[in-house]
Amino acid sequence: MPDGCLKLRGSVRAVLGDHIDTDVIYPGRYLNITDREKTAEHLFELSYPEIRGCLAAGDFLVAGRNFGCGSSREQAAAALKFAGVGAVIAGSFARIFFRNAINLGLPVVIAPEARQACVVGDVLTIDLAAGEIRNLSQNLVISAAALDMRCVELLAAGGLIPYLKRKQAA
Amino acid sequence: MGMTLAEKILARASGQTRVAPDQVVVARVDLAMSHENADLVRKSFAEIGARRVWDPTRIVIIFDHRIPAESERTAATHKAIREFVAAQGISNFYDIGRGGICHQVLPENGHVRPGMLVVGTDSHTTTHGAFGAFAVGIGATEMAGVWTDGSLWFKVPHSLRIEVQGQLAQWVSAKDLILYIIGRLGTDGADYRAVEFDGPVIRGLSVASRMVLTNLAMEMGAKVAFTPVDELLLDYLRPLAPQKIHMIAPDRDASYERTVTIDAGREVREPQIACPHAVDNVRPLSEVGDVAIDQALLGSCTNGRLEDLEIAARVVVGRTVCERTRLLVIPASQQIYREALELGYLETLVAAGAIINPPGCGPCVGIHQGILAAGETCISSTNRNFVGRMGSKDSRVYLASPAVVAASAGKDRASGHCG
C-alpha cells in the first residue's frame, strides 16, 4: 500500500464469528510454505474454503471477537493479504495476529459493532487513521478504534519490510 | 505507585526508570528464539537488505516442528537455515538430535534468566515467564527487524494477577488448574495482558509444572505470563547459568487491572478436560461423558517433561494400551528422553504398547507423525484443540493432563481411573 492509501473502499465478502483461530485461517500442515504469495492457496482451507474462491481484490472480511487467536504463524496474515483481502474488521484481535497483519501491510480495524452492522455485499469505506467505517449500503457510521500512529506509519509504508528497507538505506 | 513484573522488565529494557500500561516503548531484546520459521525470518531479513545479524550470541535457533524432515521441502528449509546459521556465526543452534522442543531446550541450556526480555517466533514463548523473563511471541517479519538491530516496540501491557490458594487434590495437576482457569476466563480472558500467577499452590509447584501455566496462559490471550522467582527456581537455574542471577519480584504496591483468586481445593476437585474445539470449552472429567479414544498423545511444550512421563509410566505400569487405541509419547527434549530412558519410564511406556516419537512438536501442530483421520478422536496433553489442529477437520481433540491421557490409553475411553 503506497503512502496516502489509509482510506479504503471495498465490499464485505464474509461475516465470520468469534475466535477465528490461525489454524482455521491457515492450517498448520502448510507451515513449511515460506513463499508468502503461495500461502493464499490455503486460506481458510479446512473450514471456509468457499471464501477464497469469491474474494475480489480489496474485499473486506468482518468478524467477531479475538480474530487470529492461537499460533504466531505469519502465514495466516500473509494468506489473507495475498488472497486479496483489503482489510479485516473485527471486534477484537489476538495480539500476535494483529502485529503480523500490520507488519505485512494488511490493514486491521477494531470495531466491536461491525459484525452486527454489516452483511455480505455491503460497500464500506474505512479511514484507518481516523478510525471510522462508513457502511454506504446501509447508510451507517460504524465506530472503530483509531490505529496507533506507529501502526499507521507501518501501513503507510506498506509493512515492516519496506519500512525497514527505507531506514536501512537512509 | 510500584511496578508489576512486566512493567519492571520493560522499563529496564527500554532504559527508563518507570513505565505505565498502554505506554509504547522501544526495548532492547536480550534473546531472540526461532525454530524452523527462521527460514521465513531469514527471507525477510534479506528483503530488508540487512547483511549481518545484530548479535549472533543473542539468537537461538532450534529445530522442533518437523524433525526429522518429513518432506523434501522441509529438508531444504532445514538445510537453508543451517547454512544461514553457519554464515552468521550463530553458535546457539540446536539441530536434530541435539535439542528438542524450543520451549524446553531454551531453559534446559541456561539461555533464560529472570528479568530478561525474550522474543520468540512461536506463540508459546510465554512459557519462559516461568523463569521470570518477559517472554513474548512475535511474527517472523518482526523477528527479522529484531535481527537487524536488536530492538522492538512494545505496548506496556496491563497486568492481571491470578492468586491460587488452597491445595491441589489428588490427580489434579498444573494442567488441570490452568485448564480450569482458561475455562473460567475464556480464550480472550487475558488478551494483551501480562499474567502473574502467585499464591501458595503456585509456589508449591515444580518448575516443570509452572511452565505448564505460563505455556497455556497464551491460550487465554496473554502477552506474557509469570510465576514467582523464588528459591526453588534459583536452585533450578544455578547449575545452568554461569552468570549472576538477579531476583525479580513485583512491587508490593504494583497496580493490577484485576486480581482473580482461585481456591484450588474447592474449585478444581478433579481433572479438567478442554473439549473440542476450543481451549476454554472446559469441563470436569466426570462431566465429559463416554468418549471413545483412537489416539492418546503425551508430549509437547506443555506436557512432555520428565514429571509428565513419570506419572504416565506410573499410570500404565503393568497394563497395556487398549487394542483400539494408540499411545504416542514425545519427550520434550533429547535430555528428557535420556533421563526417561535411564529412569525406566520409557521402558514401562513401551512395554505397555506406547510408541516413542522424536523430541519435537509433531502431531500437536498437525504436521508430523500422528495425524488424525476424519472421525478420529485424540486425548492429548498438548495445548490446542482447534478444528483440524491435529489433522482432519472432522477429527476431535480433547486436552487433558498426562495422567488422564495415560489412563485413557489404557481404557480406550477418556478416563481418570489412574490408580
Image (cartoon, rainbow, N blue to C red):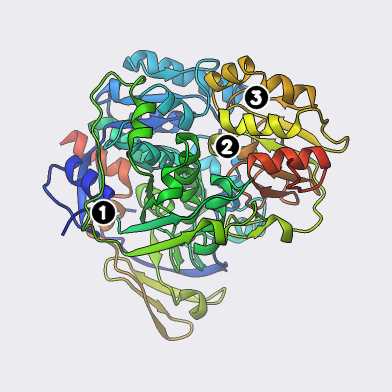
Q: In the image, which is nearer the foreground, mark 2 or mark 1?
A: 2
Residue designated by label 1: B156
Does residue B341 lie above or below B124 as drawn?
above
Q: Earlier in the sequence, mark 2 or mark 1?
A: 1
Q: Nearer the viewer, residue A68 or B327?
A: B327
| Residue type beneath disc 1 | Val
Q: Are marks 2 and 3 on the same chain?
A: yes
Q: Please state the chain letter of the residue tagged with numbered disc 2 in the rendered image.
A: B
Disc 3 on helix, strand or loop? Answer: loop
Indicate left or right for B100 with B253 as reference. Answer: right
| Residue type beneath disc 3 | Glu
The quarter of the rendered structure image containing the C terminus of chain B is top right
Residue designated by label 3: B70
Q: CA distance from mark 2 to mark 3?
A: 23 Å
Disc 1 on helix, strand or loop? Answer: loop
Indicate left or right for B382 with A10 as reference. Answer: right
- Local packing at callout 3 (Cα closer than 10 Å; few below 14, some 14-19, many 20+) is few
Q: In the image, which is nearer the foreground, mark 2 or mark 3?
A: 2
| Contact check, label 3 and label 1, Cβ < 8 Å | no
For the point 80% across and 53% down, which residue is it? B291
Disc 2 on helix, strand or loop? Answer: helix
Indicate left or right for A81 with B12 as reference. Answer: right
Residue B86 falls in which quadrant of the image? top left
| Contact check, label 2 and label 1, Cβ < 8 Å | no
